[in-house]
Image: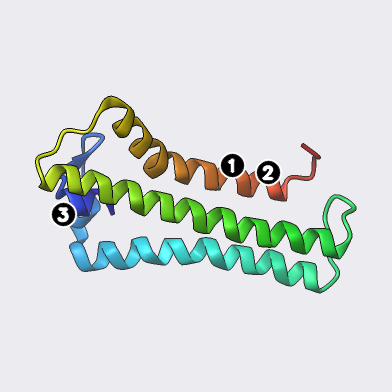
Amino acid sequence: MDDVEDDSQLRRGIPVTHKIFGVPQTINTANYVYFQAYQELFKFRRRSRDGVTRNGQDSASTQESEIYLDEVITEELINLHRGQGLDLFWRDSLTCPTEEEYIQMVLGKTGGLFRIAVKLMMARSASKV
């Protein structure tokens, strides 16, 4: 989505998706991937309701964990979109952010995707952290 909104031509030296498949297909696919992540959370929750637990946890603590994951993903997706909004605002208004503002934007935008992945892996890990 960042490449579409920035009208980028290349990402890491390779033509960007929206230049190959078009903007509508790229937007649809990006949104589809967001919802696939939620679908995985629902699978976890179903297993918890069916009495399948992990790490010896009881069903109630597993369900609390699943609610926590919903909140984490929602928060990170909001951060991602806020960061992208700032990026677009600065570009379109020809405003130069401070170094600190720029770092915070990147941490929210790009860092959020990494935080989602790590937190999901930690939540589903067989080892206790």
- The answer to whether marks 1 and 2 mark residues whose Cβ atoms lie closer than 8 Å is yes
Badge 3 amino acid: Lys
Residue designated by label 3: 19
At x 79%, y 59%, the residue is 62
Mark 1 or mark 3: name the one nearer the start of the chain: 3
**Relative to 71, does residue 89 appear above or below in the rendering?**
above
Q: Which mark is residue 57?
A: none
* Position of residue 92 measured from the top left corner of the image (x, y, whole percent): 11, 48
Residue designated by label 1: 118
* Position of residue 57 measured from the top left corner of the image (x, y, whole percent): 87, 55
Badge 1 amino acid: Val
Q: Which mark is residue 122?
A: 2
Quarter placement of the C terminus = top right
Mark 2 or mark 3: name the one nearer the start of the chain: 3
Residue 5 in the figure: left or right of residue 110: left
* Position of residue 9 measured from the top left corner of the image (x, y, whole percent): 14, 44
At x 71%, y 68%, the residue is 45
User: Callout 2 environment at 10 Å: few (<14), some (14 to 19), or many (20+)?
Assistant: few
User: Callout 1 environment at 10 Å: few (<14), some (14 to 19), or many (20+)?
Assistant: few
CA gap between label 1 and label 3 equals 30 Å
**Relative to 40, does residue 54 appear above or below in the rendering?**
above
Q: Secondary structure at mark 3?
A: helix
Residue 75 in the figure: left or right of residue 1: right
Badge 2 amino acid: Met
Q: Which image quadrant is residue 81 in?
A: bottom left
Marks 2, 3: nearer the viewer? 2
Residue 69 in the figure: left or right of residue 13: right
Comparing 60 with 49, the one in front is 60
